[in-house]
Amino acid sequence: MAERSAADATGDFAMMITLVTAGFCGLLYFVLSIRVVQMRQTHKVLLGDGGHDPLLSRIRAHANFAEYVPIILVLMGAIEVGIGRGSELLASTGILLFLLRITHAIGMTKTTANPFRVAGAAGTWIILIGLSVWAIVLAYSHTA
């Protein structure tokens, strides 16, 4: 059996949209991680938030990213494989996800409710719901 390469017969790279989105999100996750570490060093806090609200905000921005982005990337990858190719809608979704997660992180630096945090959270939820429905519809369309 010949070893399968990442490129199919047409030369298109499998899951390119998901891979690029995951790559950019991975870099953003690293930035969020560094921001937590910097604040921990500033306040000399090894565990928890030490009662420092700015540190808690950075921890929560980092954790919120970790709570939502992985399942969204799984859904994107499954859809991309399921449709057998990338799509403009999926690519736009990946770009939007990245921008919304930056928006959310900015909003988490504010001490009061603000449009950045709301837009980042609500936009992420909309993407999660949209991709979930798309995945279900795609699964059922292949069984019909």
Image (cartoon, rainbow, N blue to C red):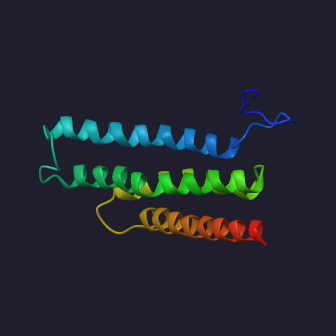
Relative side of 112 to 45, left or right: right
Where residue 106 appears, as percent x and y from the top left, is 42, 53
Q: Which residue sits furthest right?
A: 10
Q: Which quarter of the image is occupied by the N terminus? A: top right
Q: Nearer the viewer, residue 104 or 7?
A: 7
Where residue 127 appears, as percent x and y from the top left, is 58, 64
Relative side of 110 to 20, left or right: left
Q: Which residue sits furthest top?
A: 2
Relative side of 13 to 98, left or right: right
Please name the residue shown 49% across and 37% down the image: 27
Please name the residue shown 29% across and 42% down the image: 36
| 128 w.r.t. 102: above or below | below
Where residue 21 appears, as percent x and y from the top left, is 60, 45
Please name the residue shown 41% across and 38% down the image: 31
Where residue 105 appears, as percent x and y from the top left, is 41, 53
Q: Nearer the viewer, residue 85 or 51?
A: 85
Q: Nearer the viewer, residue 18 or 100?
A: 18
Q: Quadrant of residue 5?
A: top right
Q: Which quarter of the image is occupied by the C terminus? A: bottom right
Q: Quadrant of residue 83?
A: bottom right
Q: Quadrant of residue 41?
A: top left
Q: How many marks?
A: 0
Please name the residue shown 55% across and 50% down the image: 98
Q: Nearer the viewer, residue 133 or 140?
A: 140
